[in-house]
Amino acid sequence: MSGSVFFLHMAGAVALLLWATRMVRTGVERAYGNVLRQRLRQTLGNPVLAALTGLALSIALQSSTAVTLLIGSFAGLGIVTGLSGILAVRGAEVGSALVVKILSFDLTLLVPLCILTGTVIFLATERRQWRQFGRILVGVGLLILSLEMMGEASEPLRQSTIVPLIVGYLSDDPITAFLLAAVTTYLFHSSIAAVLLLTTFAARGIVSPELGIVMVLGVNLGSSFIAPMLTRSSPPSYRIVPLGNLLMRGLGSVVLLVAFIVFDPSLERLGSDPADRIIHAHIAFNVLILIVGIPLSGLILKATQALVSLQSGSEAEGASEESEAQVTETSALDVTALDTPHQALANVTRETVRMCETVEFMLCRILELYEKADKKSIAALAAVDDTVDRRHAAIKLYLARITRHEMTEDDARRCQELLGVCVKLEQVGDIIVRNMLAHVQKKMERGVEFTSEGWRELADFHASVLANARLAFNLLVTQDTETARELVMEKDRLRDVEKETSQRHFERLRQGTEQSVETSSIHLDTIRDLKQINSLLATFAYPVLEERGLLSGSRLKAT
């Protein structure tokens, strides 16, 4: 096999591995993300539970980086402490290492079973949670298939005359091997993919266990850089947990590399199989960093906070020259395009998408305020609605100026659609600020809390509305018929969910649950507001369905 053919096959296998991992992660996030977040918030107060929760979450999401970013955002919002966040991420790294061990077993039979079952489930139902479960199964099947492809692609390397020279050079130069593994892992954005690739080479005798362990340490260094780089432009409080993980895991990998080179320890305790030795070394490294990190976590947190403060000070100094300049919001509403209605409508679409992003932020943030709020955070969210109002007013005026020019029938219809979308988005913003923020204020002033069951119902209902909002925002750009149908079907499903939620709430009231009585009006009003938001966003689907003749004129039965 030529070198180019080998790299093509190997690149395809690695690409499938990364894609399958992403499928599993997004499926878990969409189907169970809200439940996982609630469990995470409840357990992060205890250091041991924080580490165990991070471990479980990493196995579920197939990514320690995703867990790091999630916990970092919680720490940034003040929901969890930086200390608990760092320990939870340490547990997540152990979980990521255990995923590699699980995938090292012979799971060949699961490939057809997972792909077949997942595809049947995905195509047989329109319920989001079941469809995402099918997506997860397909992702698992493809993930295992990608490992088989990597093994087959690497088989010809046994007969290669060049590979022994490269491996020999890396064996004699562990620093280069360490840095090469770190860079490769950062490019993959996945330590799981990098370690699995190493174990595949080790299983076929291409890479020795000693070289593999050196490169595993490099994998851990490269992986620890991913989250800090992804959050480098975030507020300082969001960077503490990712940077703390870099200090702990990155420095740990360097220290253990030096120790491995100097002491040259025996590898017998790691197993007899070369691939097992690499996997067990990866697990042992992360368990060791977790154990050492528990007593050192306070010191690491202080060092991280000092580094973040220093970095923030440098950024502020660099921006001081522009502090007197008035920063204005950019706009896609180019007045020079008004003479060309088609281009002008494209500008309106771009600006409306920005309006969607602002509304999505408001919808995400409002539930966090239900759990923890203060006057400053309430005022900050209320100020965001001013941005929505400004963009709404600007888009209306711009559309009015477009209509002064001759337009095709399609352009005129699109103009009306965009105007309707902007009106709905402005209404959603008003509901969040005028209604839901008022509920937050009332809950904060009264000092009341929802029952665990009531909060779970609210959180699940909010998650469904948020998912539908993202469907609606995507539909604005894609005009996809299937997305439009799913959005309308979700509206009908949520109507039934709202009835069931209200019935369960009234049942708790009949049982005399004190917390339910105290939060009754807030609970019911919030569900009503979320349902109204969902109904407004579902109207995004009507023009698409009507244009294709898929929308009935009335829901009334003929008499």
Image (spheres, rainbow, N blue to C red):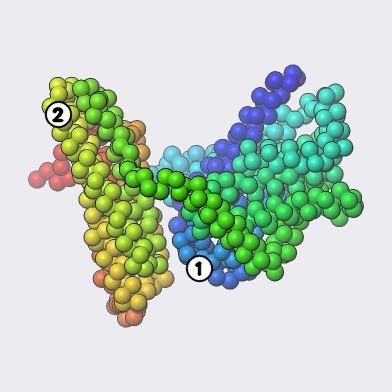
Q: Residues within 10 Å of mark 1 (few under 14, many from 20)?
A: some
Circle 2 SS class? loop
Residue 510 location (% of width, % of height): 29, 78
Q: Residue at x 54, y 66 (%)?
A: 81
Q: Residue at x 37, y 74 (%)?
A: 449
Query: Of the residues shown, which amino acid type is indicated by label 1?
Result: Gln
Residue 376, compared with residue 282, is above or below; it is below
Q: Residues within 10 Å of mark 2 (few under 14, many from 20)?
A: some
Identify the mark nearer the N-term, 1 or 2: 1
Quarter of the image that includes the N terminus: top right
Residue nearest the viewer, comparing 400 with 53 = 400
Residue 143, compared with residue 344, is above or below; it is below
Which residue is label 2 attached to? 403
Circle 1 SS class? helix
The dot on residue 375 is none
Residue 50 location (% of width, % of height): 59, 65
Q: Quadrant of residue 173?
A: top right
Quarter of the image that includes the C terminus: top left
Residue 549, compared with residue 91, is above or below; it is above
The mark lying in front, picked from 1 and 2, is: 2
Residue 375 falls left or right of residue 139: left
Residue nearest the viewer, comparing 252 with 519 = 252
Question: Residue extending furthest top?
Answer: 2
Q: Residue at x 36, y 38 (%)?
A: 474
Residue nearest the viewer, comparing 394 with 424 = 394
Residue 106 location (% of width, % of height): 72, 43
Q: Could you tell me if residue 342 is visible in this image?
A: yes
Which residue is label 1 attached to? 42
